[in-house]
Amino acid sequence: MLAKSEAQTRQVLVDNRSMGVNNGLKDHSEAELVKKADLALEMMASAGIHVPEGAVFLSTRKLWSGCMLYETGSAAHAKWLNNKDTRKSFLEHFDPDATIRERLMQIVVEYIPTSFDTDSQASLEEAARKSGLEPGDIAKARWIKPLHRRAPNQRTAHAIVLLTSKTAANTAIRQGLVMGGRNDTCGTCAEEHRTSECDNEDITKRYCVNCQAGGHTAWDRECPEFVKQQQKITARSQEAKYRYFLTEDPASWGLIPDVGDRWAQGPQIGTLPDQWTRNLDRETQLNLDNIPDR
C-alpha cells in the first residue's frame, strides 16, 4: 500500500480528451508517447527553459478515460511538472490541446457556514491561512448537497474540499479546517449553540444531526449512520481503512478503528476514548470518517 502511495507521487496525468479526432496522438503506442514526452523536455531545454537534471519519463499507461498516466523519475520531477508555469511550457512542446490534471486529495469538511463562498479563490486562500496551511494548498471546494435541496433556514452544510498534497490533507484531517464563521449547531444536542458551550448532561436529550435520531451525539463513533458510511467507504478501497493519506511518515499509517463490531455488541455510551470525545466544535471541524448519505 505504501509502495503504491509512493508511486503516485511520481505520476503525471495528461488529459487528451479535448483533442480533435484527427490529431493522431491517441493512436500512438505507449512507447511512442514516452518518447514524445521526453522530446518535449529536450525542446524546453533547447528553448532556454530550466529542466531539472535527470528529468525523464519512465513509462506511460493509457487509461480507459482517454488520459495518459505518465511515471517520472522522481517525486520532485512530477512536482516540477505540475507547477503552473512548467505545465504551460511542457504542453506547448508536447501538444497545446492537452492538459495536465493535478492529483488532488479529497476530504469532507462538515458544518461550514452556508455563507462561505466555495467558488471564491480568495475565500479558499483565507481558509488555508487560518488553518495553518500554505498558500495554494486548498485547490477547490464544492458543496455536497445541491443548493436547491437546502432547508429554508439551513445555516451550515458539508462540503468536499480538494487539497494539492497528501501532507496538506493529513494536516487538515489532524488539525481541522477553519472555513467561514462559527458553527452554531451543537454536536451533542443539535441545538443552536456551540458544542463547547453545551451544558446538557442528560443522555436522553442527546441528538445526532447526522442520522437525525436521539440517544447519541454527532461525534459518537458508534453512531449507526457513521458505521454505515464508514463500512461503505472501506469496502470500496483498502486505502480507506487508513485515517490519513499514506506517506513515508509513520504517523500517517494509523488505521481507522473498526467500530462495526463494537456496534454489533451494542453502544457503550459514556465509555468512549478521550480522543473520540474531544471538542469537535472549533470554528469548523473536519471529520473525514463521517460522510453523511444525503
Image (cartoon, rainbow, N blue to C red):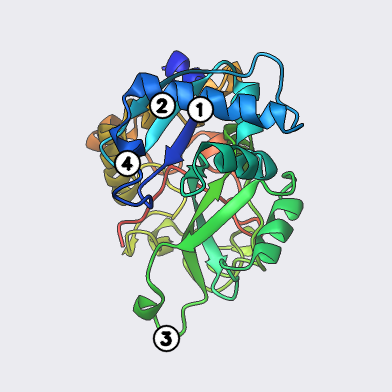
Numbered circle sitting on residue 152: 3
Q: Amino acid at mark 4?
A: Pro
Q: Position of residue 282 (x, y in %)?
A: 65, 55
Give the residue at mark 2.
33
Q: Amino acid at mark 1?
A: Ala
The answer to which of 29 and 228 lies nearer the viewer is 29
**Residue at image x 22%, y 35%?**
264
Q: Badges 4 and 2: C-beta atoms under 8 Å apart? A: no
What secondary structure is marked by label 3?
loop
Numbered circle sitting on residue 267: 4
Q: Residues within 10 Å of mark 1 (few under 14, many from 20)?
A: many
Give the residue at mark 1.
37
Q: Residues within 10 Å of mark 2 (few under 14, many from 20)?
A: many
Q: Residues within 10 Å of mark 4 (few under 14, many from 20)?
A: some
Q: Nearer the viewer, mark 1 or mark 3?
A: 1
**Residue at image x 51%, y 33%?**
273
Separation (CA) of disc 1 from disc 3: 52 Å
Separation (CA) of disc 4 from disc 1: 56 Å
Q: On screen, 14 above or below 124?
A: above
Q: Badges 4 and 1: C-beta atoms under 8 Å apart? A: no
Q: Nearer the viewer, mark 4 or mark 2?
A: 2
Mark 3 or mark 4: name the one nearer the start of the chain: 3
Q: Position of residue 12 (x, y in %)?
A: 50, 31
Q: Position of residue 160 (x, y in %)?
A: 47, 55
Separation (CA) of disc 4 from disc 2: 56 Å
What secondary structure is marked by label 1?
helix
Separation (CA) of disc 3 from disc 4: 34 Å
The answer to which of 92 and 16 lies nearer the viewer is 92
